[in-house]
Amino acid sequence: MTLDVDLASMDPAALDADDPLAGYRHRFVIPDPKLVYLDGNSLGRPPLAALERLARVAAEEWAGRLIRSWDEWLAAPLRVGDLLGTELLGAEPDEVAICDSTTVNFFRLASAALDALPDRRFIITDSANFPTDRYVLEGLARDRDRQVAWLDPDPIDGPTVADVEAALADHAGDVALVTLSHVNYRSAAIADLAAITDLAHAAGALVLWDLSHSAGALPVGLARHGVDLAVGCTYKYLNGGPGAPAWLYIRRDLQTTLRNPIQGWFGQADQFEMGQRFRPADGIAGWLTGTPGILGLAAAEEGIRLSAEAGIEAIRAKGVALTEYAIALHDAWLEPRGFTLGSPRESARRGSHVSVRRRNARELTRQLIAAGVVPDFRAPDSIRLGLSPLTTSFTDVARGLAVLADLADGPETASQASV
Amino acid sequence: MTLDVDLASMDPAALDADDPLAGYRHRFVIPDPKLVYLDGNSLGRPPLAALERLARVAAEEWAGRLIRSWDEWLAAPLRVGDLLGTELLGAEPDEVAICDSTTVNFFRLASAALDALPDRRFIITDSANFPTDRYVLEGLARDRDRQVAWLDPDPIDGPTVADVEAALADHAGDVALVTLSHVNYRSAAIADLAAITDLAHAAGALVLWDLSHSAGALPVGLARHGVDLAVGCTYKYLNGGPGAPAWLYIRRDLQTTLRNPIQGWFGQADQFEMGQRFRPADGIAGWLTGTPGILGLAAAEEGIRLSAEAGIEAIRAKGVALTEYAIALHDAWLEPRGFTLGSPRESARRGSHVSVRRRNARELTRQLIAAGVVPDFRAPDSIRLGLSPLTTSFTDVARGLAVLADLADGPETASQASV
């Protein structure tokens, strides 16, 4: 698909018919096919396999084999971590583990990075970064006597290489950690992971990427770009389930030079010998903490497996096509109704969602949901349309934006944009 | 039931017939009634209601209402926390939240306690405390320039009031935190929570109890005893599921004077306004961190609800009866075969499991499991028999110990102890 054609006038059914990933929609539980769900970037739909797996884990593994199932469960955080890391994140084997929440993992890795560079005072991040990252950093800076250097980038384009370069220069030799989201949660702007990682390294700092809006949506190339540290969730594009366990990535050589601030028994070598002193297990296993939630992990594995099967390049191609289509419809139907685009226009700079902005966006979001179109609202004025490549159809996009155009005209006005 | 009768010679079927909680066994999924499961203190059996609930959460809440289910899910950590806290732990409302793992919660509360008393150098704990607690404390002491004063108590009786008193005197005015397990994971010894809490307070220290082997097994009286801080898991006697989310308790007045070291977005007031600075929510809500795992939490709620329905006093009475019976059978059948009791004999000093010790315990445990009796082994020489009041029958206890007596005689010798 190219922008040479008038995308907005294309028949969404024809686009769906040409979609090589269209069949994946049938691998998910979709009880109400009429519902237009544009929030898979917040909570992905459940794979059929996840429901089957949950029932099996509960009835056979938990009820049936009881404690003996730990013989298999113990391997799950690293088995699923490897699947995610090698197939979807471009990590090497034994660099990713599924564990804890994104917040706890972010805390642990940021904390370990600061501990590794005790004489450097600054943490560079972005004032539009995801709240939990900002709050964790605020607490860490306070407790470790460090300071956050807040970037204040363009709200749509997000932090640029030049923004980071300037901040590194302002605090030359004194930056311990550069941490950003790869895809901004509000605008979907993609930060230049490769260049920013290189800049941080050249300045002697460590880099920690939040990949919550990237994992399962676009290729990341963690190993190729020499990324130090990363975290992310599995409940968005990876369709892992509500509050599904998160993951962390630590480049191999840093797994032993950095130190896990939360030394738990699941990170212990010879865990069940219960020895007196903490002796971390080799590899990424040494970064596990407490007992992993097996029900959530089992469901997440099925979501991750589906994305791995579809292939991250194919997923990315569809994500680009869906967002290009949504932007074309925005330009045709919404812009005349007072909307502005809250996401980058260049597809290479945009993740898999599109934000559209207008006054009264909060109320419009409420009306959309009442009309069977589910996006989400992000303060102060954004309606965020999440286009999840394995489950969102072009027809969903067209129907959703047509309803939004209708609503923007007010309840009494009929729309010319209906599909 | 009293010890005046010869308990070992009583008919276990008659004891089961007299058991007011016997009916609860039918509320659990028990696919193989012949399996003698004596490890409910490690992983409790699944309530029928948990399997039904999981299926409903997946199909209706996740698949059906999708992101809109967060309207209800958001309240779950505190709703379930209140149920657990008020019905089973003796806490006041709004003092318990279900979240994260025991390890992460233990880290957070121990860390907050140390931060609150920066001029005090020592942490008192027990060298036989559960590994994850010891490892976390070892890391915290290193990172915060503190020192662990290890108690080295009797391996069966666990730390006494005198042990703690002596350690407090050794480091008078210099102890920040006293932290122990209420019920020892190996011997089941109960520490004197009330007296030790009072001692710690008199010395100006904070106290943090690990209640993993207490919650759902015996009354704790957190509020009555003025306990500062506590954590525990939900996958043992509470039957919450494998790796089910843990909980934390913070006495009301400490919720704002202590500071959460992991400031996550779920602890933020007006979470979805995503404001620039961290402003903790009021009450225990300010101690949440990342996105809670909803599948695990839903299953855990059903387990907690069953225990609350049965009542903690009735549960404790049955726990005492089961362990007294197990000890009577140990004395009659195992002691003559070279076993010694690894748990306190006085029921008021013993939780709901019984450890029996003998050379070759690891191999005997393997043989027991092969013979359809599932306890667990704890290095170096303990077989731990977990007697979970809602699911373990007196017949289970008799059959399990009879098989063990058989095995102890070696494969060729017939037992006189068969039931």
Image (cartoon, coloured by chain):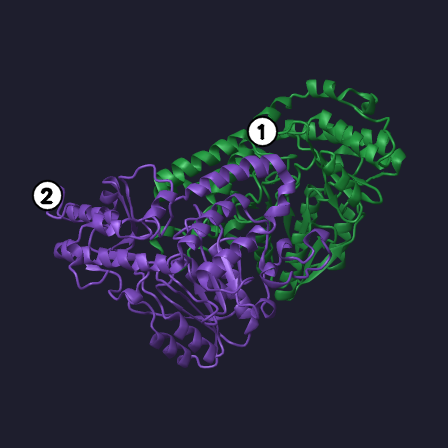
Chain colours: A purple, B green
Q: What residue type is labelled 2?
A: Ala
Foreground residue among A133 and B10: B10
* Residue at 53%, 32% in the rendered image: B305
Where B253 falls versus A347 (above or below)?
A: above
| Placement of the C terminus of chain A among the 4 image quadrants | top left
Query: Which quadrant of the view contains residue B28?
Result: top right
Please indicate whether residue B191 sits to the left or right of residue B278 in the image. Answer: right
Other residues around mark 1 within 10 Å, as few (<14) / some (14–19) / many (≥20): many
Query: Which quadrant of the view contains residue B46?
Result: top right
Foreground residue among A67 and B205: A67
* Residue at 78%, 45% in the rendered image: B362
**Measured Cα–Cα span from mark 2 to mark 1:** 56 Å
Determine which residue is flagged by label 1: B28
In the structure shown, which secondary structural element does the residue marked by tag 2 occupy?
loop
Where does the image place residue B373, in percent across and percent down from the top left? 72, 34
Determine which residue is flagged by label 2: A414
Label 1 marks a residue whose chain is: B
| Placement of the N terminus of chain A among the 4 image quadrants | bottom left
Where A293 falls versus A331 (above or below)?
A: above
The disc at residue B277 is: none
Where does the image place residue B302, in percent across and percent down from the top left? 52, 33
Where does the image place residue A403, in percent across and percent down from the top left? 19, 45
Where A215 falls versus B193 (above or below)?
A: below
